Image (cartoon, rainbow, N blue to C red):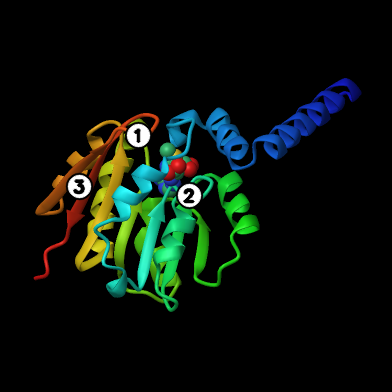
Amino acid sequence: MTGYEVTQVRKTTRLKQKLRQYLGPWGVFLQGFIEHPVMVGSIIPSSRFTIRKMLGPVDWDRCQLFVEYGPGVGTFCRPVLDRLRRDGMLIVIDTNKLFIDYLNRTITDSRFVAVHGSAEDVEDIIRAQGHQQADYILSGLPFSTLPEGIGPRIAAATHRAIRPGGAFLTYQFSKSAQDLTAQHFTRVDSGFEWLNILPCRLAWGWKSEN
Ligand SMILES: C[S@@+](CC[C@H](N)C(=O)[O-])C[C@H]1O[C@@H](n2cnc3c(N)ncnc32)[C@H](O)[C@@H]1O
């Protein structure tokens, strides 16, 4: 690199740092979107209305392990930790290292584990944390824009990873997450939240008890 190029890289890095400090978590999310638009799929984190509605049906007394795919800057993490039992665990999985590093810096809760990886590997990831299955898995993944084949593989692995009676929770503007859920889960409840950018479809796929 020439001296001029090094100066330009330094200037860009300083600008990104300033933007992140000014905007807080929104700045980190925006940077993640600018760098990986297809994988992030949204420029604004979910609203509190979406969070409340999505987590409503969870039976927290029976939740030892809660898994989240695509936590981004952790919009759902704090509300999940607020509801989770003291001896529970929240594992979040994201392909974007920027987000995982941010979460590890900002969430200091012994029940919280942030993994840099893909949701496709959920079974190995939960086994590595000493669990056989998850009670609930929540997904913020943009299924409609993920590279071909990844969505179906994630949906199949998710069904295997959830215990009987547990559920797969999704929220997305398009119907693709709900359609993938319906391919594996016999009962799928659905909902809608207008107060979100963009408004989103909510789905709860319940794994049968037997
Ligand atoms: C729409 S953002 C989620 C935002 C956040 N959950 C919220 O509610 O505001 C989608 C996230 O999925 C992550 N992601 C994309 N593909 C993934 C995969 N295969 N496994 C895990 N995370 C993935 C992206 O890095 C991004 O953080």
Amino acid type at circle 2 is Asp
Which residue position holds label 3?
Answer: 181
Where, by quadrant of the figure, is residue 174 drawn?
Answer: top left
Which residue position holds label 1?
Answer: 195
Question: Which residue is pictured at 41% across the width and 74% down the height?
Answer: 88
* Label 3 secondary element: helix
Which is more N-terminal, label 3 or label 2?
Answer: 2
Q: Nearer the viewer, mark 2 or mark 1?
A: 1
Question: Which residue is pictured at 27% across the width and 62% down the height?
Answer: 58
- Ligand 1 quadrant? top left
Amino acid type at circle 1 is Leu
Looking at the image, residue 172 sits to the left or right of residue 159; the answer is right
In the displayed structure, 71 sits above or below 14; it is: below
Q: Quadrant of the N terminus?
A: top right
Neighbour class for label 3 at 10 Å: few (<14), some, many (≥20)?
many
Asked whether residue 194 appears in the rendered view, the answer is: yes
Which residue position holds label 2?
Answer: 94
Which is more N-terminal, label 1 or label 3?
Answer: 3
Question: Which residue is pictured at 56% across the width and 47% down the height?
Answer: 99
Looking at the image, residue 198 sits to the left or right of residue 181; the answer is right
Q: Quadrant of the C terminus?
A: bottom left
Q: Nearer the viewer, residue 100 or 87?
A: 87
Which is more N-terminal, label 1 or label 2?
Answer: 2
Asked whether residue 1 appears in the rendered view, the answer is: no
